[in-house]
Amino acid sequence: MKILVIGGGGREHAICWKLSNEKQVEKIYCAPGNAGIGEVAQCVDIKDDDIDGLLKFALDNEIDLTVVGPEVPLVLGVVDKFQENGLRVFGPDKKCAQLEGSKAFCKDFMVRHAIPTAKYREYTDVSEAIGNIDEFGYPVVIKADGLAAGKGVVIAQTHEAAIEALNEMMSEKKFGDAGEKIVIEEFLTGVETSILAFVDNNTIVQMVSAKDHKKVYNGEKGPNTGGMGTFSPSEIYTEELAEKVRVSVLEKTLEGFKKDGLKFRGILFVGLMISPDGEKVLEYNVRFGDPETQSVLFRLETDLSEIMMAITEDRLKEVEITYSDEEAVCVMLVSGGYPENYEKGKVITGLDSLDDGIMVFHSGTKMSDGKLVTNGGRVIGITSKGKTVAQASEKVYANIQKINFEGMHYRTDIMK
């Protein structure tokens, strides 16, 4: 089987790595890929939003399965385009991708199908939004409707901060077209967690849980990032909670897809707040989370290609999905200054001296003059397994001491 993976981050490296260990996979291409992905797949210089370029490559190279990693090509309709040309592709179509591409579409779906979520209002007029901003009290959550690279959410603590956020999003176009419509939500309290699920038209199957750490500094302090590390399983996601989420969220979501005629095939990421009032959905994403994927796929024992092929044929229920009993930890090494301003091109050393059982998933790297250098805010994720998260974490941090690049930063508390 020849597979094309679209994307070039840590999530895509984890997908390519997993697929590269499967017997039925003959060849893997990745567009655009990165330096680490280049060790397990052939990188192709096509951007992940170049839909026509990706389609031409897939047709010319007789690709058997295309796997879409990031949200942008999904929202742009890459799945529809490939399917129109007779190609097998793993991921939800453009209509389904609105669950991530539009906050208003997502919230409307949840309310319509009685899926527990925060109260909200949507606005397209900044004056009207400002006039009603006090409706949910403070703090209040303000979201740009469209994709904003994970940065279009503000938790405003005061009336003044809320007005500033509204003006930045709607009047100053801080996030471009994403802020033409905004969603204002009540602020929920509780413990945040998330779950990934495999989905086809008939079945939704939870993966093993993972706990993501979003804040850049220890103790969940500082600005939000794309993720500073994960461990799997999450300490709060018990079997009892998993069953509650299955009934109150996942089965209702699948039923909602059917009622709305949404033919969802792919990955559903559900952001949850475990509040005093029960489980509530914060958001849906329509692809693997990053860096949750690095921990979860590191534990997956069933062939990922088998699962993906089954989903494209609506026979997910036929596949027995198993995971290692060992627990996993992934710690992100990031550029100095991330998630704000940071420099690229810093030489990375020490990766050739790591212990056996340590996996390095590349997020933002490239080769320059024969040297591995940084090429993004999140640079690499150091991942390992152990009998417990504590054991895996100990292995990861011992090996991080061997790695260096100028300005390197990481959290030291990615553990239970």
Image (spheres, rainbow, N blue to C red):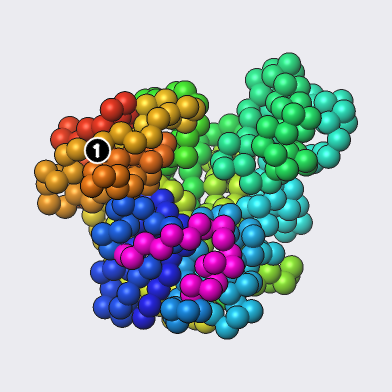
Q: Position of residue 214 (x, y in %)?
A: 45, 35
Relative side of 400 to 235, left or right: left
Relative side of 63 to 137, left or right: left
Q: Amino acid at mark 1?
A: Ile
Q: Which quadrant of the figure has residue 113?
A: bottom right
Asked if residue 267 lies in the magenta stretch, the reply is no
Relative side of 353 to 367, left or right: left
The C terminus lies in quadrant: top left
Considering only vertical position in the picture, is 56 above or below 366?
Answer: below
Relative side of 392 to 142, left or right: left
Residue 219 in view in this figure: yes
Q: Residue at x 56, y 61 (%)?
A: 50
Q: How many marks?
A: 1
Q: Position of residue 398 (x, y in %)?
A: 16, 36
Q: Position of residue 247 (x, y in %)?
A: 57, 60
Asked if residue 42 lies in the magenta stretch, the reply is yes
Task: Return the residue nearer the eye: 29 or 286.
Answer: 29
Q: Residue at x 76, y 56 (%)?
A: 112
The single residue placed furthest to the front in the displayed view is 369
The residue carrying mark 1 is: 348
The N terminus lies in quadrant: bottom left
Residue 265 in view in this figure: no
What kind of element bears circle 1? loop
Q: Which residues are magenta?
A: 41-58
